[in-house]
Amino acid sequence: MKFPFSLLAIFLLFSCQPNTQAPEATSNSTKPRTIVTTDGEIDDVDSFIRMLLYANEFRIEGLIYSSSMWHYKGDGKGTLFTSEMEMTKNLYGAKTDLRWPGVEWMNPLLDAYEEVYPKLSQHAEGFPTAAYLKSVIRVGNIDFEGEMEMDTEGSDFIKAKLLDDNMEPIYLQVWGGTNTIARALKSIEDQYKGKPEWKSIYKKVIDKAIIYAILDQDATYRKYIAPNWPDLKIYYNSSQFWCLAYPWKQAVPEFQHYLLEGKFMGEEIINNHGPLLKQYYSYGDGQKQAGDDEHIHGDSSRLVNAQWGSFGVYDFISEGDSPAYLHLINVGLDNLDHPEWGGWGGRLVQSLDQPNRWEDGAGVLDFNPFTDTLDATYPQIRWVEAIQQDFAARADWCVKDFAEANHPPMVQAVGSTRISAQAGEKLTLEVKVQDPDGDQVNLDFWIYQEVGTYSGKAKLEAEGNQVRVDLDPAGSGQLHVIADAKDQGVHPMTRYVRFVIEVGK
């Protein structure tokens, strides 16, 4: 998510030896493949740092520098460029380059990740080595916003992944513009369209690729991808990410602000948690990103902003792109194949007009009990506490041995999680819970009312690891019951089971 300082008010881990091979542990076969494209905004850096603490949860197959309407390198020839996007066109006019952070900023972060890797690897299997991650860095299309005329190392890398023989889905995270992805697709089209194999190539790509985009940060999706690859799946987050972005104070309930304020962020995450987290950008931290003259957030004399409010030292700035990989973490909500069911990456529903597009916005509202309203951001806000406490627990993994840190509880259903029932029926759902640290685990059962199609009112009565569900005699449709298992360790971690009940009459 990219917005300059002056603009936001406009929008409300077992080997420690170097290894350049992708981790291929058996457990990885069930982890989603992903490629990250990023323009290097300060919030991309913070998203990147958090992502590294979760790098065991998915298979990072590419890290690609790209451009956006907010950040581009220029061609080095003095060519003036004017944005195609109305906002940045009006804000910047014609520029030869714009707030470009370069193509080296990942390296010091991965060097620091290498230092904490031995500790991280005590806590969970599957963390890739820094050497492997460095081996999948490529430079994509960076000269200008939306530039997709030239093949680049980055676009060729994405192209090769889309054409390889691994037919598992590959999630293309868009933290900037879609132009490098668009160039990869255009190169495939140029090579194969009009040839006998085009139909099978097209199907291979659309069967594999899923774009997860945070807003449109150039015009290449609209102008090229959507018209020429209309069957390619896209998850489009335009509303829900705000609670993890620059205007978080306006979105997150005030009683939860502490999770993003300096005392929590500074003491529990940034400081005394190793060299990686020390590079995390926060308010008043004295850090300044090279190349971006609008990164003034680290200046402790400029903590009051008329647009976003007053901030303290080490307050959270933004991680607007983090929902793109939070969606990939398996915490038990079964959202990976069902983005419309909601999870740590928010809740996206299938577009009525474009069946290969899942989106948020005015049609995806969850009831916010803190404001007593239906809220377009609450599908993400509802997970903020769990997400931030999980982040703090993983920050401890960077510096503590296994016995000293907290780890997520293991919770699973007793029996099936997909259940058929009749109206008026009484059901008993059960889970079993184990905590690797021996902590007490508190269970809460609740109905995700906004998800599914259930038309009645169901009653829950929990006792221990079980909950009785009394179904409405007049109700029918799909009912979602969530078992929420939260351990009582330092920085409580939460995992879930989702029961989906199909209720007939």
Image (cartoon, rainbow, N blue to C red):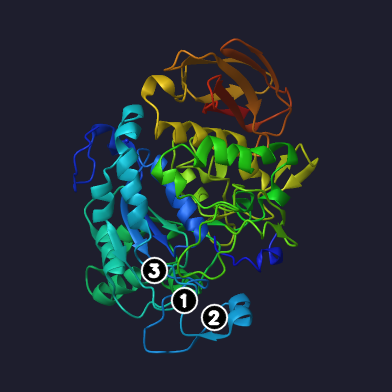
Q: Which residue is mark 1?
A: 145
Q: Secondary structure at mark 3?
A: loop
Q: Is 176 rendered above or below residue 143? A: above
Q: Which residue is mark 3?
A: 102
Q: Amino acid at mark 2?
A: Glu
Query: Is residue 391 rendered to the left or right of residue 156?
Result: right
Quadrant for the C terminus, please.
top right
Callout 3 crowding tier (Cα within 10 Å): few <14, some 14–19, many ≥20 = some
Can I make out residue 169 in this image? no
Compare residues 36 and 332 and report the one nearer the observer.
Answer: 36
Q: CA distance from mark 3 to mark 2?
A: 22 Å
Residue at coordinates 64% horizontally, 49% vertically from top-left? 243
Q: Is 389 rendered above or below residue 238? A: above
Q: Which residue is mark 2?
A: 84
Q: Secondary structure at mark 2?
A: loop
Can I make out residue 369 in this image? yes
Q: Amino acid at mark 3?
A: Gly
Whole-percent x and y of residue 139? 31, 67
Ranked by sequence position, the earlier of labels 1 and 2 is 2
